[in-house]
Image (cartoon, helix red, strand yellow):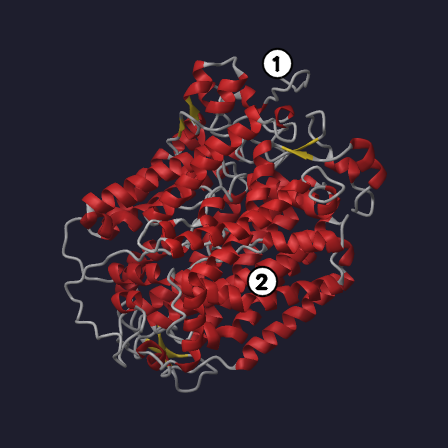
Amino acid sequence: MGTIASPPPFDVEKETTKPSPDSDEDSPIEEVRLTVLTTDDPSLPVWTFRMWFLGVLSCALLAFLNQFFAYRTEPLVITQITVQVASLPVGHFMARVLPESKFRVPGFGDRVFSLNPGPFNMKEHVLISIFANAGSAFGSGSAYAVGIVNIIKAFYGRSISFLASWILIITTQVLGYGWAGLLRKYVVEPAHMWWPSTLVQVSLFRALHEKEHRRMSRAKFFMIALTCSFLWYALPGYLFPTLSNISILCYTYSKSVTAQQIGSGMRGLGIGSFTFDWATIAAFMFSPLICPFFAIANICIGFLFIMYVLTPISYWWLDLYNAKRFPIFSSHLFTANGSTYDITSIVNKQFELDIPAYEAQGKIHLSTFFAITYGLGFATIAATLTHVAFFNGREIYQRYQASYKGKEDIHTRLMKKYKDIPGWWFYLMLAVTMVVSLILCTALKSQVQLPWWGLLFACGMAFVFTLPVSVITATTNQTPGLNIITEYAMGLIYPGRPIANVCFKTYGYMSMAQAVSFLSDFKLGHYMKIPPRSMFIVQFVGTIIAGTINLCVAWYLLGSIHNICQDTLLSPDSPWTCPGDRVFFDASVIWGLVGPRRIFGPLGTYGALNWFFLGGALGPVVVWGFHRMFPTKSWIPLINLPVLLGATAMMPPATSLNYNSWIVVGTIFNFFIFRYRKKWWQRYNYILSAALDAGVAFMGVFLYFTLTMENKQLNWWGTGGEHCPLATCPTAKGVQADGCPVF
């Protein structure tokens, strides 16, 4: 689920007077009129050597870095904004040093080419950023299907071939482009489909390409901040890892289980915990510097309520679902007596559920917080649908109607100058991807478990949901997450097969998510007047490059790091704990291997959590009713239940430390600095965010290849992790756990 991102302000000294909304010369959406230029220069070169070189390089680099950091305890996602900022001085440098001589290429007739066709322009810059966005899986970090390879090899201890893995990753990434191609005319070209999040990028491009006459240029500031970030990360990244997660209560009460449960930022409530590590701050929820404050405030309220009201009441007061037998915060699965569930023992040789072994070991139990997050996930899905229907339904319907009846705005008319993408490009890509996917599900079914009808069912769900979800995102910037719906449905229909379930979810949910991301990038190109065919080719090539590099990096790390992802077998300071894949693995067990009937159904322990669906659906209706009863109370429609209920959607794998630090830093920059030092924020806020990300990424890779690979490890108090060993202890009477006191 997304939130409406307010575009950053930019210098308006050179802004011309904007036409009125009724003018044929501009968009009917005010935010678009205030942000997007209504002029275009079709003569600007975009298909340049600079674009290809920097685009492919940035795509490959981001694919490598994001996959590399995905396995770490504090994963770092390097987004396109880093490349957007960093590629600008490099592009200008190449425009100064590359030869301007012209030449012909055999096979291209009389066409003349040049490595340097003129000044580095904004359209080249946009395409480079689109390349980079593909390298970061459109902001997700790495290709979603890599998680399937990770859980097969690292958690289940089984095998999958490189070919099957590659086909799975590429087809799930590309399939959504086919859906997007079918819908592009309906959700990109109409002016009322305005995609709010793209305005952030438009604003940043305009700000970066303004001429500067200041001592501290953005490029200079970027290099200084990057250098500082690079050097500083040597401390939390290697020399002094405890700086990443400092918990005051754990140091003060070294023998108290309750105090460490309250104070641990990694395994508890995180009161009094903080960090000096940017990787910890930006992990899971991306950089807080690029999130508008109203979204931070909503997430903060939801986090405080769920973490500091709901969780303590459920654990200490109600002992909900025998909560005290398990850690207060954990993504592991447990038996009824509090011991860790041995998942591999309930998987037979056919990679399916061994029912006698499962019955012998007993039902699966979840930690308190993990169970609550599933219930909140159910509520968030339902609340998102009803919130959008009641608060945005009329607007969406009117804008969808206007997309048919409304006049073309200036941006659509300007784009008519460029050759459109032939429809058969999309149809062919969709047909080829479907055929290859069917081959995967038949010839290689033993490795992916998904039957051919499961693939068609997943594609059908994706196709049905892509248009409404795209319209919702294009008008409200809220994207309903349908991953739980897909895994719930497949778990009921085809239980006992974990890999079939996650493959179904990936084909059903991720192909839709890819389509929405693809369309969002197309809208950015629409606003920036990028030739559509260039956009298509860059996105497609970038996706193939990124998916291939993601898999190669994953394959290498899975084979070279001993006990990767096994946090109970790794040293306390090991960064290779794979928190995201741990949750993905648990989901494959809950929804696929064991199945929802044995967890959330009549055969399970957590059936009552299904009532969260109803509560989530009714909540926005109640808020909407109060809004209708008291229309003068302007604060009532600000109650966004999908945001509040989904505030902790990233927990686990995210921890209270991640949320605490993210909220504090985001508030400092996007409230105080934005309000009281707006000029500085306007010029340097996004630049600082990109520099911090890049510095941590480069130092992290440098440390791995120079020290970690050589097994050169330090061993002192500052490398001992969080120093909260009792935070994971159960508190129920008589329950025993390694290293824990017995109450």
Looking at the picture, how far across and down is residue 2, in whole percent? 44, 54
- The residue positioned farthest toward the front in the image shown: 629
- Helix, strand or loop status at disc 2: helix
Amino acid on which the number 2 mark rests in the picture? Ser
Q: Is residue 409 left or right of residue 2?
A: left
- Helix, strand or loop status at disc 1: loop
Looking at the picture, how far across and down is residue 310, in whole percent? 51, 33
Mark 1 touches mark 2? (CB < 8 Å): no
Q: Is residue 219 left or right of residue 504?
A: left
Q: CA distance from mark 1 to mark 2?
A: 48 Å
Amino acid on which the number 1 mark rests in the picture? Pro
Identify the mark nearer the N-term, 1 or 2: 2
Residue beneath label 1, please?
Answer: 741
Looking at the picture, how far across and down is residue 631, in whole percent? 34, 56
Q: Is residue 371 left or right of residue 35?
A: right
- Up/down of 642 relative to 609, above or below: below
Of residue 242 and residue 634, the one placed in the foreground of this image is 634
Looking at the picture, how far across and down is residue 709, in whole percent? 54, 35
Of residue 102 and residue 435, the one placed in the foreground of this image is 435
In the rendered image, is residue 115 in sight?
no
At x 65%, y 50%, the residue is: 148
At x 14%, y 49%, the residue is: 215
Of residue 158 and residue 583, the one placed in the foreground of this image is 583
Residue beneath label 2, please?
Answer: 511
